[in-house]
Amino acid sequence: MDNERIISSDPELFLKLAKMRMPFGKYKGRLLIDLPEPYVVWFSQKGFPEGQIGEMLRIIYEIKTNGLEYLFTPLREK
């Protein structure tokens, strides 16, 4: 199943992605959806971390490389 279908079929995952922050590294504390695309691409080339953060970064990679960031606009905190 592709990530767009996963997101649309699992609203809880979508909301979790919208709120999750990077737990380590150069961009610690930044929302995953706000990570620079080159950084996420770097992970895709070097290997995603293990566990939940790795899965979330994989989905963010697909979102960014497919230009789907706009889906998160309505969920951004003001």
Image (tube, rainbow, N blue to C red):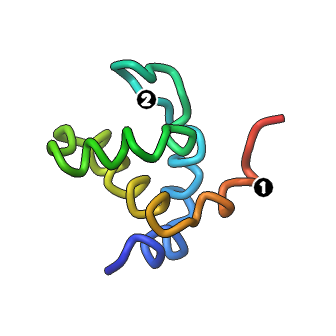
Q: Up-down: is 31 above or below 52?
A: above
15 left or right of 73? left
- Residue 57 % position (x, y): 35, 47
Reading the image, the residue beneath label 1 is: 74
35 left or right of 62? right
Seen at 15% across and 45% down, the residue is 47
- Residue 30 % position (x, y): 54, 27
Q: Up-down: is 24 above or below 59?
A: above
Seen at 26% across and 43% down, the residue is 43
Seen at 36% across and 44% down, the residue is 40
Structural crowding at the residue carrying mark 1, measured as other residues with C-alpha within 10 Å and reported as few (<14), some (14–19) or many (≥20):
few
**Amino acid under label 2?**
Met
Counting every numbered tag in the picture gives: 2
* Of 18 and 58, the residue lying toward us: 58
Q: What quarter of the picture does the C terminus occupy?
A: top right
* Of 8 and 43, the residue lying toward us: 43
Q: Quadrant of residue 5 in the image?
A: bottom left
- Residue 22 % position (x, y): 43, 29
**Amino acid under label 1?**
Pro
Element carrying mark 2: loop
- Lower sequence index among marks 1 and 2: 2
Reading the image, the residue beneath label 2 is: 22
- Residue 50 % position (x, y): 16, 40
Element carrying mark 1: helix
Furthest residue toward right? 78
Q: Quadrant of residue 76 in the image?
A: top right
Seen at 50% across and 75% down, the residue is 9
Q: Up-down: is 1 above or below 65?
A: below
